[in-house]
Amino acid sequence: MSPSPRLTLRAPSLEATHAVAAALAALSRSGDVILLAGEMGAGKTAFAQGFGRALGVTEPITSPTFTLVHSYDTGGPTLHHADLYRLDHLAEVADLALGELAEFDGIVLVEWGDVVESSFGEHLVVRLELLDGDVDARRIVISPTGPTWARRWPELTQRLERP
């Protein structure tokens, strides 16, 4: 069995992080679940902001830490932005029905989704990491699970590996 593909990028600025998010948004479609992982302050919400803007969201995109899910009209699939940080039990995650939001003409971004990754079917994980010595730079590691993203992987890799 071959290892899962993985793409590791360095984003030297907030604008570069938004550009990675925009490239990913351009290939996303209804039914996609994208898990955003990383420590507090790693840039998950900033990534979601770049992603949403690329889809056409014009209202401010904020962390849904207390409301758990924010939904945004994009003129296409609805963008659902979830934050699982405050949830303590897998049952609480199931109650959010994030998979169903994706199935009904939606794209779902899930901050802290990696902590319950096994509860999602096909998905993409975007891990953001702070880089020592540079407050603006991030390492972004992207890895797919399932055939849906595997089919789009070559195009995603090509878009993101351009200098």
Image (spheres, helix red, strand yellow):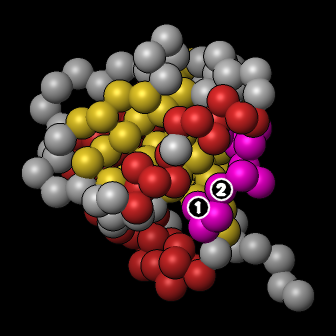
Q: CA distance from mark 1 to mark 2?
A: 7 Å
* Snapshot quadrant of residue 56: top left
Tag count: 2
Instruction: Give whichever of 74, 144 is nearer the camera.
Output: 74
Please give the name of the residue rendered at 13% of the width and 32% of the height, measured from the top-left corner. 58
- Residue 65 in sight from this viewpoint: yes
Q: Nearer the viewer, residue 94 or 46?
A: 94
Task: Residue 153: give x, y in percent of width and height.
Answer: 52, 77
Magenta span contains residue 117: yes
In the rendered structure, which amino acid carries the disc numbered 1? His
Residue bearing mark 2: 120
Q: Residue at x 45, y 71 (%)?
A: 156
**Would you name the residue on which mark 1 appears?**
123
> On the picture, is 39 further left or further right than 33?
right
Which residues make up the magenta segment?
Answer: 111-123
| Amino acid marked by disc 2 | Phe
Give how far across and how far down residue 144 sits, in percent.
63, 67
Q: Are marks 1 and 2 in contact (CB under 8 Å)?
A: yes
Instruction: Name the image quarter holding residue 163.
Output: bottom left
User: Badge 2: how crowded within 10 Å, few (<14), some, or many (20+)?
Assistant: some
- 59 sits left or right of 162 in the view: left
Above or below — where is 133 with respect to 92?
A: above
Residue 79, image x, y percentages = 31, 44
- Secondary structure state at the residue bearing disc 2: loop
> Residue at the right extreme?
1
**In the image, residue 105 lies in the stretch drawn in magenta:** no
Label 1: which secondary element: strand
Whether residue 32 sits left or right of residue 143 in the image: it is left
